[in-house]
Image (cartoon, coloured by chain):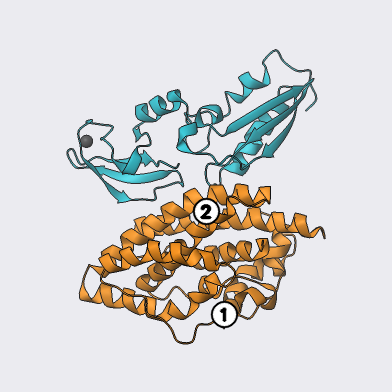
Amino acid sequence: MNVLGFADDNLILAQRLSEWVAAAPDLELDIAVANIALDHLGVARALLTHFGDLEGKGRTEDDLAMFRSERELTNLLICEQPNGDFGQTIARQLLFDSYQVGLWEKLAGSPDEVLAAVASKALLEARYHWQHSATWTERLGRGTEESNRRMQSGLVALARYVDEMFDEHQDLRRGFDERLTPVLDESRLVLPKDPFPRRGGRRGMHTEHLGHLLAKMQSLARAYPGVQW
Amino acid sequence: MVTTATTLSPHQLLDQVMDPELPFLSIADLGILRGVETVGTRVRVTITPTYSGCPAMDAIRKDIESMLDSHGYQPEVVLSRAPAWTTDDLSPRARDLLQQHGFAPPQPDHSVGCPRCADGPARVVSRFGSTACKALMVCGSCGEPFDLFKELR
Ligand SMILES: [Zn+2]
């Protein structure tokens, strides 16, 4: 199983989400986003540590998070996409949560015991994240013409990154559709089929956004290696 | 610190280690204390996180270490993730203590009565509260805002 890929998805999404802290539409959302980001970061830390153990070269979670370059990161492209407006962020979260609930369900039965333990824990959290995303999708989709338009544009912008999530796990597509479609229908939204899906994250081929994210995320650790506070 | 072990057992000492975010709840009542093995003065304590990213875990680990260390034990704290912690692991006493401190104990589907007036219905203000384990509610009857200890299972 691709432990590093799963770790990177959670690491990069946590960093993206944390950009909303102190900038979300209201205080409650600020706190919600920070909580969700923390869950993803906790999963990333556990899996990076586990990958370091499996690799056996003595690399720690910090080495792996802070001292790999863009081409060495293996997250899915959807995780690095900019937050955009709040509608686009919720679109990304709904798509990713709908995928990740199924992924953790599957990995909870992995023969890799550490991975299975992380997955069983993360599954409970991912379901809760999904509920939050679904609630907000409905609120935006059925809210005003403007909120529906923004959420719909978010889905259009992200549609091209959906197929990549299932390249390694075709079996998760059906559960994804079953989680996603009723919410979108209820919210008067559609996920369009993009004729030119983008992929490559797992091979280190990223969109232009990841480099900027890493520049911020890694700057302190690189300027002061080994820094603690 | 090197002293001889006191008469308090590791279990008794660990009963005094509280969750830093809910300081009226011991880690045993919270259900995150998974095991205590004592050999002489060496104590191996196993804990599990409530949430994957729970920022209190490091503080809890240090609190356990200093509590045991200051009573002459040599602690080792181990983190175990399986089986995953759920709110079913809260002790009955934890539920009472939550109620007494103005929190609503975990309920299915966030359906919950107000801890002040016991009237309802309360509605969800935010599914995420001031810490990972809480949601923010408001009573539809008396208007009191309160924290719900989120159900996780
Ligand atoms: Zn009330």
Q: Chain of mark 1?
A: A
Q: Give x and y (percent) for residue B132.
A: 46, 47
Which type of secondary structure does the marked residue at label 2 adopt? helix
Chain in orange? Answer: A
Per the rendering, the mark at residue A105 is 2
> Disc 2 residue type?
Glu
- Kindly identify the residue that appears in the image at 41 percent across and 43 percent down: B134
Q: Is residue A166 visible?
A: yes
Where residue B13 appears, x then y in whole percent?
A: 63, 22
Task: Say which mark, if any, is on residue A43.
Answer: none
Q: Would residue A6 be found to the left or right of residue A84 on screen? A: right
Colour-to-chain, cyan? B
A103 over B100 or under it: above or below: below
Residue furthest to the bottom in view is A196
State left or right for residue A126 relative to residue A7. left
**Which quadrant would residue B17 be assigned to in this image?**
top right
- Give A188 or B65, whichever is nearer the viewer: A188
| Left or right of residue B60: residue A194 | left
**Which badge, 2 or 1, is on the more N-terminal residue?**
2
Task: Name the residue rendered at 28%, 78% in the picture.
Answer: A149
